[in-house]
Image: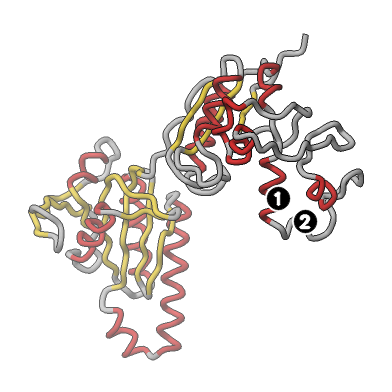
Amino acid sequence: MVPQQPLVAGHVAGKAARRVPPPPPEHGHLHPRLGQAAGGRRPAEPGPDDNGLVAGPAELRAAAGHGSGRPRAGVMADPDGGHRLALDVDVRNVLGAITAPTLVVHRSDDVFSPVAHGRYLAAHIADARYVALPGRDHPFFIGDDDAVLDAIEEHITGSRPAPRHDRVLATAMFVDIVGSTDRAAAMGDRAWGDLLQAHHTLVRRQLERFAGREIDTAGDGFFSAFDGPARAVACGCAIRDGARALGIEVRVGLHTGECQVIDGKIGGITVHIAARVAAVAEPSEVPVSRTIKDLSAGSGIRFEDRGTHALKGVPEAWQLYRVEV
């Protein structure tokens, strides 16, 4: 016997169902049209299409291309007609025949389908599970679709997906050229542009060497991220040494901490601290936070105490260290 696959019943369940008799009066509250039937005004009896499925009023069946196997032109441009066609489908008499494990997902403030619809489905399908989610959008792919997909994944796999975190532990590094404005004015645009290009090539080569990731570049400044602090320190020192060979000096500053991931880039207070550490650096100096020093234990990198500093905009005093040459 072939095992049955799990079933997910969405907001509009059973877009096609076997033809069933008119709904009984006790269920007339499920939709205004059914309420009319309960009040004694029965809607026109729909007839089956070629597949024996309920298609709705005669005029809608004709507009949909009854017997042709395809909708006629202009049908999709009539949203009211499409909604009526969907609402004419009644699947209640076949719900008891469903034996596959079933999940019914419904948004609590659905503007198209009342929650009574979803609850009715869950109550009349054997062992169905009903999940109510916040929101008012009817299509599952609008609004918070992650919540819908998480519920479906749990239904199919038997476990909730792992939570998605938008924070990561990273080392942020800032590098900029000392006295860049004065140097550019003295050299002229063309010569300065050539030197700046050589500097950018140097930085990117070292980032690749030490598995760093370029996050942003502005003028002569680079903002990069690393998975490990020791590699970041080594990269900063390599950039400093390479800049000297180009006849320029750079400032480098580093800090490690949790960062907010924003559109694939990192941000947050950790990044601000790294920028402030770089701002207090002397030419060709690589200062780091105490966090960097502590996490680099065993790497062989030697640090010299640089004292405590008030970093602009950052609470409290910060103990800084410089990398020994």
Q: Nearer the viewer, residue 316 or 121?
A: 121
**Residue drawn at 67 percent across, 55 percent down:** 79
Q: CA distance from mark 1 to mark 2?
A: 8 Å
List the single residue furthest toward the front. Answer: 40
Q: In the displayed orientation, state which residue is furthest to the top.
A: 1
Q: Which residue is mark 1?
A: 82
The image quarter containing residue 262 is bottom left
Please give left or right for residue 192 compared with residue 253 in the image: right
**Image location (x, y in percent) of residue 268:** 28, 54
Closest to the observer, 40 or 196: 40
Q: Residue at x 32, y 53 (%)?
A: 172
Q: Nearer the viewer, residue 40 or 203?
A: 40
| Residue at the disc numbered 2 | 75
**Pointers 1 and 2 in contact (CB under 8 A)?**
yes
- Taking the image as shown, residue 194 lies to the left or right of residue 69, namely left
Assess disc 2: are there few (<14), some (14-19) or many (≥20) residues with their C-alpha within 10 Å of its C-alpha: some
Q: How many marks?
A: 2
Position of residue 73 in the picture relative to residue 140 (left or right): right
Image location (x, y in percent) of residue 178: 26, 74
Q: Where is residue 123 drawn, in percent x and y?
A: 55, 20
What residue type is disc 1 on?
A: Gly
In this view, the residue in front, 275 or 26, is 26
Residue at image coords 31%, 45%: 229
Residue 138 pos. (x, y %) = 55, 45
Q: Is residue 45 left or right of residue 134?
A: right
Q: Earlier in the sequence, mark 1 or mark 2?
A: 2
**Label 2 is placed on what type of residue?**
Val
